[in-house]
Image (cartoon, rainbow, N blue to C red):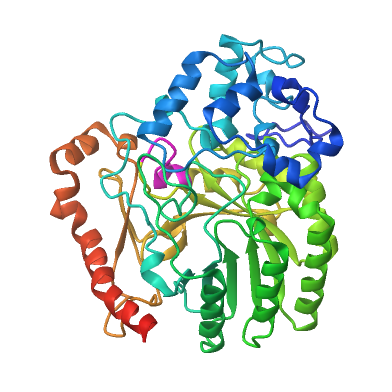
Amino acid sequence: MTAKIEQPYRYQQRALVEPDWTRFPGWRDVTAAEWADVQWQRAHCVKNLRQLRELMGGLLTDELYADLESDQAERATMSMLVTPQMMNTMVSEMTWGRFGDAQRMPAAGEEFTRAFRADPVRQYMLPVFSDRRTDWPSHPYATRDSLHEHDMWVAEGLTHRYPTKVLAELLPTCPQYCGHCTRMDLVGNSTAQVVKLKLAGKPVDRHQAMIDYLRATPSVRDVVVSGGDVANMPWKNLEAFLDRLLEIDTIKDIRLASKALMGLPQHWLAPDVVEGVARVSATARARGVGLAIHTHVNNAQSVTPLVADAARAMLEAGVRDVRNQGVLMRGVNATSEDLLDLCFALSDGASVTPYYFYMCDMIPFAEHWRLSLSEAQHLQHAIMGYLPGFATPRIVCDVPFVGKRWVHQVDTYDHERGISYWRKNYRTSIESEDVDVTSAEYVYYDPIYTLSDSGQQWWREHGAGSSDAAGLHQEAVDRAAASRQASVDQLVH
């Protein structure tokens, strides 16, 4: 008889749960039909403290609301916008066991507030001031457009970063706003800390300029259609854009980016959307184009039966694959158990392929979420061997001026100061032919609080002005600035 072997992670199939929304006083009388209606969901998003109070009744303490209000006033880079579907996964039946009795919702007041503070979905959708770090709230090199996507625009909203791939930002809004949004400089409403950029052109003109560029650039074969979130675009408009993309013979892959597959599955289950996806999928198949949907789920408790229904509806409508791109965040999913629970919930429960986990980008006030490169490398190692190879997500660092790199592809790594150096094998649209990109090194920075005492002290003494730490960083920034005007001139002419 073979002895039972204990593994570091214990796999078990878990049934998905659609939490009972009537546990929240403000939704006590909401019917199942209302909950399934996409317009009801959009109309009842939580957009401010008043609406959160009305929803929660007496469940939360005044201290929590004050903490949230302080964050909105002093730290938040994204305005408050949470769909009912997402709110309903916070402090739900899936998580009650973490706070005591697995059969009982935490009691109102201090007990529920502790559970709410600890909830992983709450931590990135409704960040509070006390979540943020006070020693290093932002990295010295944090920037609004941390990946320099705007520098690489070849038409307004069209980023040509990789040799064969482009990102098309069709609109600057989403059904929900995540606190860690990498496009916080453009997406959503302005906050007290961040006055958002605005797309200048009319949507019809911007979209036409994108199509014109792609028709004139046969080296591009892959288009990520994003924003914002394509779920916020009227379906007829999105379908018209996709139809024009499919008329370009050189386009072979189209990916629709939508966190709403998880945050607002009701949208992707709406009959007009399902029928429209089926039409586009049929055209894509006939023309040999791969059509996929990329969503963004960060914790297993967000994977509910409605999310599974939406993902499978898209697969049945003919999309080739539904894939997940999560973001590594401390307090949300920064353990191997959290990541594996999420991957199995996606693949077993919802037919969604775990694809990427990104290291959280270097935007302002995000340090409390970010992990060091060495922590990310450890997590990649820890999740190997449990999932099928095709469903084992790659943990990647999105390096400024470079792009996505597996975390073990780092060229050199100064652990003491938390500075990693990376190489690439192609030019972006802002790099001229005289730039030797194959020999240049590009830099990425760990959160300073994760460093040793001596490493942190080095940053206190040198900060952003250190030539030792920042030489390559500044070189890359200068190169982008020098190239930007040439790119603008090309767009204008």
Residue 318 appears in the picture as rendered: no
Residue 197: name its quadrant.
bottom left
Q: Nearer the viewer, residue 416 or 202?
A: 202
In this picture, residue 174 sits left or right of residue 390? left
Identified at 47% across, 70% down, the residue is: 201
Give the side of residue 348 with respect to residue 160, left or right: right
Q: Measuring 55% from the left and 56% from the top, which residue is drawn there?
A: 228
Taking the image as drawn, is residue 67 in sight?
A: yes
Above or below, comparing residue 438 to residue 404 in the picture: below
Query: Which quadrant is home to the N terminus?
Result: top right
Nearer to me, 443 or 279 = 279
Furthest residue toward front: 202
Residue 493 lies, with reference to residue 15, above or below; the image says: below
Seen at 76% across and 29% down, the residue is 19
Q: Nearer the viewer, residue 42 or 185?
A: 42
The quadrant of the picture occupied by the C terminus is: bottom left
Residue 311 in the image, given as x and y percentages of width and height: 77, 53
Query: Measured from the top left, where is residue 203 in percent x and y?
Result: 55, 69
Q: Which stretch did the figure color magenta?
A: 365-376
How far from the left and from the top, in percent, is residue 255?
64, 67
Asked whether 74 or 308 is in front, the reply is: 74
Instruction: Decide whether residue 23 is among the magenta residues.
Output: no
Q: Main secondary structure of the magenta part?
A: loop
Task: Please tell me which residue is depicted at 74% across the width and 48% down the height of the picture.
Answer: 265
Q: Is residue 202 left or right of residue 305?
A: left
Image coordinates for residue 446, horizontal then vertical, percent = 34, 45
Q: How many marks?
A: 0
Instruction: Identify whether 40 is placed above or below 29.
Output: below
Q: Looking at the image, is 169 positioned above or below residue 457? A: below
